Amino acid sequence: MASIEIANARKSYGAVDVLHGIDLDISDGEFIVLVGPSGCGKSTLLRMIAGLEDITSGDISIAGNVVNDLQPKDRDIAMVFQSYALYPHMSVAENMSYALTLRKTAKEKIADAITNVADILGLSALLERRPKALSGGQRQRVAMGRAIVRKPQAFLFDEPLSNLDARLREQMRTEIRKLHRRLGATSVYVTHDQIEAMTMADRIVAMHDGIIQQVGSPVEIYDHPANIFVASFIGSPAMNFLEGTYETKDDNGADGAGIRLSDGSLVAVLPARGATNNQAVTLGARPEHITIAPDANSGLAARIDLIEPMGLSTLVHATLAGKPIKIFTMDRPDYAVDSTIHVSFDMEKVHVFDTKSELRLPPVIEPHPGHRD
C-alpha cells in the first residue's frame, strides 16, 4: 500500500474551473472519504488520482512518485465504480480474474487469489454464476473482489453504494469497513451521502464548489465544523440556523455573550473568539442540542408545526423567531400541532458563525479541550 499526496491540483475545462488548488495528504493505509453535493468536484478529484482525468496543474503523487503523466494502468491503483462494470458474459470467477489474465499471471496463482478473495467476500458459492444471476450487493462484492485480487497500492471507490437500497447500503458499509481493516489498504471513497462519510471514514474531506472546506475525523467535523456549509451538510437531521446579532451583555446588563434573535429573544452562548458587539452572526444548533422545557417558566416560546415519531426517538418540527427548527428528543412527547412549547439551547454545544464570511467563530475556551477522535 502507499500514501497519496495532492499538491495544488487544479482542473479546468476551457474557461470553467472545476477544482481550485487542492492540497491533501493521504497516509498509507488510511480510509479517506471525499464528501459533498453534486458538482463539488469530488468525483473529478478521484478520477484525477486514477488517471481517468488529466490534471490541469499541480502534482499527484502515489508512493512518493509523481504520476501526472502516467496512464491509469501504470499507476497501480484499482477502482470500484457505481455501476459495477462487470462483463455480463463472464462468470464471477472470470470477472475477478480478468486483470490477472491480461497480465499473463500463472493460472495457479490466479486460482489461489480468486479462492482467497472469494472466501473473504463470501462469494465462494457464486464463482460460476454470471452477473445477471446476482443481487446488487453480490455484484458490488464481485467488483470489489476484482479490485482486491490485483493487490494495488490504493483502492478508489466512486459512489459504489448509490444503486443499492437503504438496508443493503447499510450492510455494504459495514462490509467495506471490515474489509479495509483486514487489508489495511489505502482507500479513497467518494460519496454524497454524509451518513456513509460519518460511519466509514478515518478522515472526511468536505468539498464544495471545487474547494476543500474542511478535513478532519468524523467527530471533529461534526463537533467543530469550519463553516456553515460543513455544519449544514454533515449531520442528519441537519443543523438549525438562526440569524441574529452578537451581544456581550445579558438582559440584566451583566457580562455574558448571547445572540439576539429577530423576535428580541436572547440565546446565551459561550464568548466567541473575534466576535464584536452587534455583529451579524448566525446561531447554529443541532437538533439534539435543543431541549423542550417541562413548563412555560423557562426557555423560548416556539410553535409546533409537525411531529415525526421515529420509534426510538421523536423529531419535532417547530417555528422559533419566525424560522423553522428541528428538535431531536428521545421522549415521546404528547404535543399537538400548533401548540406552544418552550425550548432551551445547550450553550456549550451551539455554534456562532459570522454571517458575512460564514466561518465558525470558535469559543474563547473550547468546552472540552482536547476532545478529538
Image (cartoon, rainbow, N blue to C red):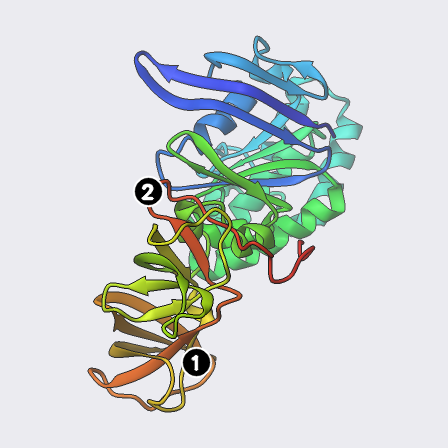
Mark 2, residue position: 356
The quadrant holding residue 68 is top right
| Mark number displayed over residue 311 | 1
**Residue, x 24% and y 78% (percent of image)?**
303
The image quadrant where one finds the C terminus is bottom right
The quadrant holding residue 345 is bottom left
Is residue 205 toward the left or the right of residue 93 in the image? left
**Residue, x 44% and y 52% (percent of image)?**
231
Is residue 301 toward the left or the right of residue 107 in the image? left
Comparing 371 with 42, the one in front is: 371
| Mark number displayed over residue 295 | none
Question: Residue 289: x percent and y percent?
Answer: 46, 70
Name the secondary structure under disc 1.
loop
Question: Residue 85: x percent and y percent?
Answer: 47, 33
Comparing 118 with 108, the one in front is: 118
Name the secondary structure under disc 2.
loop
Residue type for callout 2: Lys
Picture layout, residue 83 above or below residue 292: above
Q: Gap in Å between the C-alphas at discs 1 and 2?
A: 39 Å
Residue type for callout 1: Gly
Q: Earlier in the sequence, mark 1 or mark 2?
A: 1
Picture layout, residue 62 above or below residue 34: above
